[in-house]
Amino acid sequence: MVSPQETQSCKTFVAGRPGASRFLKATRRLVGAAVAAATSTAALALAPFVGPVASASPEQLTLAIAWTGTQAAGVPPLIKLYNKEHPSVQWNVVSNVSEQKLLAEEAAGDAPSAAMLITTNLVATMASSGAIVPLQPYVTRSHFQLDQFTSASLYSNSYLGAQYALPFFEDTYALYYNKTLFKEAGITSAPVTLQQLATDAAKLTKTGPNGQYSQLGFEPSMPKELEAYLYGGNWASASGTPTATSARTEEGVRWLVNMETRFGSSKVQRFLAANSGAAGSIDPFALGKVGMDISGEWFMPSIYQESPNLNFGVAPIPYPAGYRQFAGTGSVGGNPLVILKGAKDPSAAWALVSWLATKGQVEATTNRVLFHDIYSVPALKSLVDDPKLAPTPQMAFFWRYSGGSNIHPFPPIPDATSYLNAITSAVQEAQVGRMSVSKALQQVQHQYGPLIEDMVKSANSQSK
Amino acid sequence: MTATAPVAERRRAIEGAPAAPGDLQDGRRRRKWLSLRRRRCLWGLAFVSPWLIGTGGLVLYPMALSLYYSFTNYDIVSSYQFVGLANYGGLLRDPQFRQALGNTFYLVVVMVPLSLVVALGYALLLNVPVYGQRVFRTVLYLPQMVPTVASAILWMWVLNPQFGLVNTILGWFHILGPLWLNSISWSKPSIVLLNVWGIGGAAIIFLAGLQGISPMLVDAAKVDGAGLWRRFRHVTLPALSPLILFNAVMGVLGAMQYFTQAFIMGGGESGGSSVGLGNSLQFAVVYLYEVAFGDLRVGYASAMGWVLFMMMLVVIAVLLRVSARWVFYEGWRKQ
């Protein structure tokens, strides 16, 4: 116990020091502020008990989406609809959230509850590190039917046999061809085989007075993962082992490299640079200067914007002559819906993720305004099999095509993004003649084979 | 002031400094909790505390942590295990890291010396007293003021093989310009060209050095019959040598950490695309970024960071060691 005399002597001691009055004032202010804060906190805490019972405010949760611009604009109306159906929870959408931002937020313990990633290639990487949670417990608990999605989309959202994400919308590739240029060259239909494609490409290619191409028959800058599928190959086995050097994969890559060397890599690159803008903002196909191009359904809005009158068609990616079993080949990848580790309310996140993947997809495709923004391929079989809802015949084709049996996602293996980067780089080196196709693929296999195998083994042993 | 007054007080009286808080008018001093020296030390520390906190919390602590992580399989979100030297061993076997190092050393060997030569050339020209000298100086320094991302986008247009400014000018002389960023062979020279364009900062440092050279030295050389080249070789260059070393060290540090322009011009992004055709613009820090934040292999990326740091130290040490032979410091004699 401090006596009044002692208190007084303390005050005298302090008051005798220079600046003491300011110190005392500051101390009084601090104590006053602390008392006020404590009082208001107590008042807030006691409010529900002393005042009239207010209606419970809905739980605030965040959905982070990687989309930006027009596509991102399509999501908030869907979430508004969900919030209306589920008044106990209020979801807020944050767009332009990359996986780096998500991880930083997760590491800081402030992860959004649910997220839509930019590519399915990230699912395996994030699943192997534990950044996203497996969905199987929720699937089982809610008797959710996974087989309502196309098998390729489902596979691309899994990791080592377990479902870690649900497909929202997908992207798939097909052959675009310019009907006007085809007519001018006397070609009556889209090529069915790779050999026909090469012949048509030669007919459609024109050289200008400066010796450079003024029109290109076929743009060989297709996604590098597609080449493996042309001859029935793949980039990894079902167990997750990289297969960059398998004979079928190499055959597909060789076809593309031969196409580029046949037309001259340097001349092709110069043509593409001249007709693509500085940052690839313009596409030479959309400008009507390319006869054939392999691209995704997302390419169509830019065609409509740049060349509304371009007369183009879409067709299956040609298969090698004599290999009809590889007809209708292609790749699929999309925007996975995931629940992040450390989610504030995982059950609420599952409710949203499962709603967006099913009812949300249906809503987005039936509502023309929303679909105009999102403009992708649905992953639900019911929509894929019945593409009457698609806004154009071309989009209807993409919907049907994405459900085919020869449509493959890039294998959901750990380190998928780096592996794909190495494939892309090696194939580009082969295309410009810096190394042979075999050597390029051997290099990739040598680098990533053991690494990914080790990661898969490690993940398997951990899951056991 | 009596002879018995404390030493510190007598010193203050002589220096005319005000009495410290707590000193009494009659020269007696209240007993202090801390000695004057310690108090001064604490004041000093208090004044430098922003720097200490910044360096400790934002540099030294993350560095120590990254060294620790380099021996683990840390991936940001899950628990990690100690893996010994596995990450460092992995780097030795990683062809992509070797390619990234090769690309980086290209910048060190080609871009840094070329930038020094061009910056020195700029400075010599800007030092010539001609009409409009200030305008020339401003114009040559302007690129330094352009934001990095904007300059990268601008140069993507300038270097377009078909309608870019550079190839258009070459076309006037019937020369078919290279593919620049669309070529594996020409993408790195494109980066060098961009860097040389924005060399104004180094040129200004050289210009300041040139203006600090004593005219007496130049006059003495003239009297001795030295021509333009000899005056440059034996007067100007030795006088500028400390600045050449400074710019070289800064250039090497910048080259070994090259990122933004390469990432933008090479089209680096999520999802596995290559940075530059055939990863020709994948420099060491770009690769580090992709491994750390694309693949979440932060332990491996930390090891990469430390290997790069060590390499940087070695290169700088060699540069400083060699500099003893050619750097001349005025007023300094070798013992």
Image: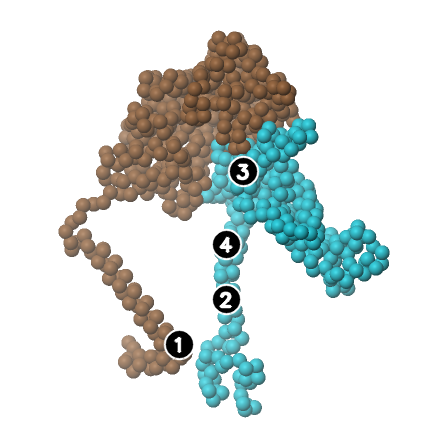
Q: Residue at 40% x, 35% y: name it.
A: A68
Pointers 2 and 3 within a single chain = yes
Q: Residue at 52% x, 64% y: name it.
A: B48
Q: Residue at 77% x, 52% y: name it.
A: B232
Vertically, is A409 above or below A339? above
Between the residue at mark 4 and the residue at mark 2, the CA separation in whole angstroms equals: 18 Å
Is residue B89 among the parts visible in the rendering? no
Badge 3: few (under 14), some or many (20 or more) residues near its Cα, within 10 Å? some
Quarter of the image with the N terminus of chain B is bottom right
Label 3: which secondary element: helix
Q: Amino acid at mark 1?
A: Gly
Label 1: which secondary element: loop
Q: Chain of mark 2?
A: B
Which residue, given by chain and number where applicable, does mark 2 sit on? Answer: B47
Quarter of the image with the C terminus of chain B is bottom right
Which residue, given by chain and number where applicable, does mark 1 sit on? Answer: A19
What color was chain A assigned in the picture? brown
In the rendered image, the residue lying farthest to the right is B225
Could you tell me residue B90's position as x and y percent? 58, 38
Vertically, is A106 above or below A235? below
Q: Earlier in the sequence, mark 2 or mark 3?
A: 2
Vertically, is A377 above or below A185? below
In the rendered image, the residue lying farthest to the left is A52
Pointers 1 and 2 within a single chain = no
Label 2: which secondary element: helix
Pointers 4 and 1 within a single chain = no
